Amino acid sequence: MTALFALATSLLWGLADFGGGLLTRRAPALTVVVVSQSIAAVVLGAVVVATGGWSETGPRLWFAVAAGLVGPVALLSFYKALALGPMGVVSPLATLSVAVPVSVGLFLGERPGLVQVAGIAVAVAGVVLAGGPQLRSAPVQRQALLLTLVAALGFGTVFVLITEASTTVTGLFLALFVQRVTNVAAGGTALWCAVRRGTPALPGGGLPWTSLPAYGFVGLADVAANGTYAVAAQHGPVVVAAVLASLYPVVTALAARGFLHERLRGLQAAGAGLALVGTLLLAAG
């Protein structure tokens, strides 16, 4: 059961990332975040009511609020990076977010094993190889790399905060709901400020109703991934769940290759692969 739900997590996160990247090529990234998270918040609210999640209300929810403030920055950066592409490089680099929980553990007195040390070295090498070959000739790729690293830092911070925000499955639903309500509030405020400065909130032809299912899929796939990961971690070793769930960049890369026909330079592909291997070593350590 652990393997099944953890792999489902990878599939859902990978498809959500791919969909979010595509939508950001047609609409402002901030709009994608606000619309998709709004749909997710509505659905999560219904889930919380149905499961009695309100009984889990307590001081721990402040961690969810903090996660909700960090989340939009991470998602905005990530969707912009995916839009700049190539997705096959951006998505694996984002899995470096696992370094944040590792760093928190170090601060609290934990000491990494040889596997984790190897993972850090391999991941850093992957970042250099994936971003370095194009830094001088294509500044936009430097921007994509920077945005991806910002997103990874944000995602890792959210993982730590959400872990502290709940201790049960129903509590997790409530924490995710509070997180997404905060996401929408923070993102909506940022979007309003952007519009006030003259930045359009919608694409040229407006936001067609026919695109709402795509936005809903992105938001709900992200929520469902959090749910399947929680089930996986509760029914088996957390290390196994984390390693299998961290394979989601493979899904994004395969989707980009299959639907967008992306082609990567050999060195870029090697760097992205090293970053993914380093992430798996960090999670397994």
Image (cartoon, rainbow, N blue to C red):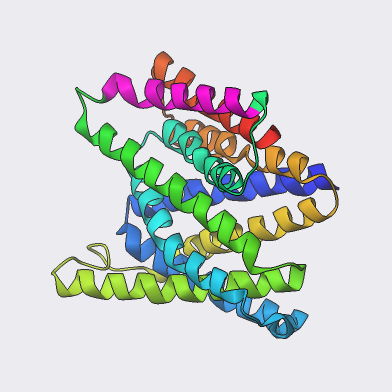
Residue 264 visible here: no
Front residue of 49/83: it is 49
* Residue 48 included in the magenta stretch of the image: no
- Whether 260 is drawn above or below 225: the answer is above
Residue beneath the point at 42% across and 71% down? 209
Residue 252 place in picture, x, y as percent:
53, 39
Specify whether 25 is left or right of 4: left
Q: Which image quadrant is residue 33 in?
A: bottom left
Residue 243 place in picture, x, y as percent:
69, 37
Residue beneath the point at 43% across and 31% down? 89
* Residue 130 included in the magenta stretch of the image: yes
- Whether 209 is drawn above or below 268: the answer is below
Residue 91 visible here: yes
Front residue of 212/142: it is 142
Q: Which residues are magenta?
A: 116-134
Q: Which image quadrant is residue 70 in?
A: bottom left
- Whether 185 is drawn above or below 70: the answer is below
Residue beneath the point at 43% across and 35% down? 260
Outermost residue on the left side: it is: 198
Specify whether 164 is left or right of 274: right
- Whether 75 is drawn above or below 105: the answer is below
